[in-house]
């Protein structure tokens, strides 16, 4: 549990925009346990925030050497690839994550958005249609599905999901 003792101050430093303190504590957490995913993902994110995307990628890839099927690490790497405009590689990673951990609605949502951004509307619709069966009350999934269906010209189907979304969070009068 000493690794958590280093992670928590690192996250606090990051919240206070003390990048040096955050980096030091996150590296310390990783020195105690190199497979500690929260420290790996947060260190990579600190690097991203300071324009050191390549360092972040190296940290994520090192973590994946230890845990090649870790959904959190693969997701972070997929997002990094999106930012680097490596669309095909990003889609491959994000698809892998969505299939590794279908219980996490966020992974399916992000993959669907990436598919839609890549112009793969039909695949983008299929992903949340599958995910909504597992997560019928996830607002991101419902919203994405409604939006993608609307874009595809399927207004009636889109309206069904918009109504379900409205039932979750009714608009204030």
Image (cartoon, rainbow, N blue to C red):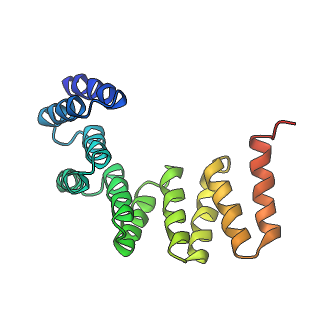
Q: In the image, is 3 to the left or to the right of 163?
A: left
Q: Position of residue 41 (x, y in %)?
A: 30, 44
Q: Where is residue 153 in the image (x, y as percent from the top left)?
A: 75, 76
Percent position (x, y) of residue 70?
A: 31, 52
Q: Quadrant of residue 19?
A: top left
Q: In this view, does 143 lie above or below 158?
A: above
Q: Which residue lies furthest to the right in this view?
A: 173
Question: What residue appears at the point 21 percent right and 57 percent down from the top-left corner?
Answer: 54
Say if 6 sits above or below 94 in the image. Answer: above
Q: In this view, does 73 lie to the left or right of 126?
A: left
Q: Quadrant of the N terminus?
A: top left
The number of discs equals: 0
Please, is residue 100 above or below residue 19 in the view?
Answer: below
Looking at this view, name the residue that lies furthest to the left: 31
Name the residue located 20 percent from the left edge and 42 percent from the top edge.
35
Q: At x 54% / y 64%, what residue is drawn?
A: 112
Q: In which quarter of the image is the C terminus?
A: top right
Tell me what residue is drawn at x 43 percent, y 66 percent: 95
- Residue 60's spot in the image, x, y percent? 24, 52
Quadrant location of residue 26?
top left
């Amino acid at each position: 549990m000493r690794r958590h003792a280093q992670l928590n101050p690192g996250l606090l430093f990051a919240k206070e925009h003390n990048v040096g303190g955050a980096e030091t504590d996150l590296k310390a957490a990783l020195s105690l346990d190199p497979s500690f995913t929260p420290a790996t993902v947060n260190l990579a994110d600190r690097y991203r925030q300071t324009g050191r995307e390549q360092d972040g990628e190296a940290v994520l890839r090192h973590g994946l050497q230890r845990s090649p099927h870790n959904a959190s690490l693969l997701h972070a790497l997929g997002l990094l690839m999106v930012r680097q405009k490596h669309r095909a590689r990003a889609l491959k990673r994000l698809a892998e994550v969505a299939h590794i951990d279908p219980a996490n609605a966020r992974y399916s949502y992000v993959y669907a958005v990436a598919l839609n951004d890549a112009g793969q509307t039909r695949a983008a619709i299929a992903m949340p249609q599958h995910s909504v069966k597992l997560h019928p009350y996830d607002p991101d999934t419902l919203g994405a599905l409604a939006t993608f269906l609307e874009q595809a010209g399927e207004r009636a189907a889109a309206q069904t999901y918009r109504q379900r979304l409205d039932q979750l969070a009714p608009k204030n009068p």
